[in-house]
Amino acid sequence: MNPVREYRLRENMTQDELARLLGVDRSNIAKWEAGVHKPHADMLVRLSQITQCSLDEILGKWDE
């Protein structure tokens, strides 16, 4: 499973809620989860803060 989706669901958030917290459009979240695009480094940092996981965890999931 895509790490953005995995951690978003773990936190019981919708794409809209995560998008609002990250300051991006919901379509960005959908594209990240679909694998169309990957978030920029600054978004990964914010995602790790929001979901309380390490960057290593998120980046490691992308290689699976």
Image (cartoon, rainbow, N blue to C red):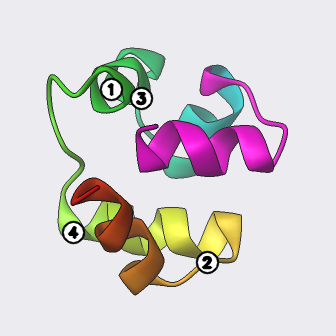
Expressed as whole percent of the image width and height from the top left, the position of residue 35 reads 22, 28
Other-residue count near label 3 (Cα within 10 Å), few / some / many at <14 / 14–19 / ≥20: many
The magenta segment: 1-15
Q: Residue at x 51, y 62 (%)?
A: 47
Specify which label sits upstream in the sequence, 4 or 2: 4
Q: Which element carries disc 4, helix, strand or loop?
A: helix
The residues tagged by marks 4 and 1 sit, at their Cα atoms, a distance apart of 14 Å
Q: Is residue 58 left or right of residue 16?
A: left
Residue 41 badge = 4
Specify which label sits upstream in the sequence, 1 or 2: 1
Amino acid type at mark 3: Ile
Q: Which residue is mark 2?
A: 53
Residue 64 quadrant: bottom left
The residues tagged by marks 3 and 1 sit, at their Cα atoms, a distance apart of 4 Å
Q: Residue at x 30, y 32 (%)?
A: 32
Other-residue count near label 4 (Cα within 10 Å), few / some / many at <14 / 14–19 / ≥20: few
The residues tagged by marks 3 and 2 sit, at their Cα atoms, a distance apart of 18 Å
The residues tagged by marks 1 and 2 sit, at their Cα atoms, a distance apart of 20 Å
Amino acid type at mark 2: Cys
Q: Which residue is mark 3?
A: 29
Specify which label sits upstream in the sequence, 3 or 4: 3
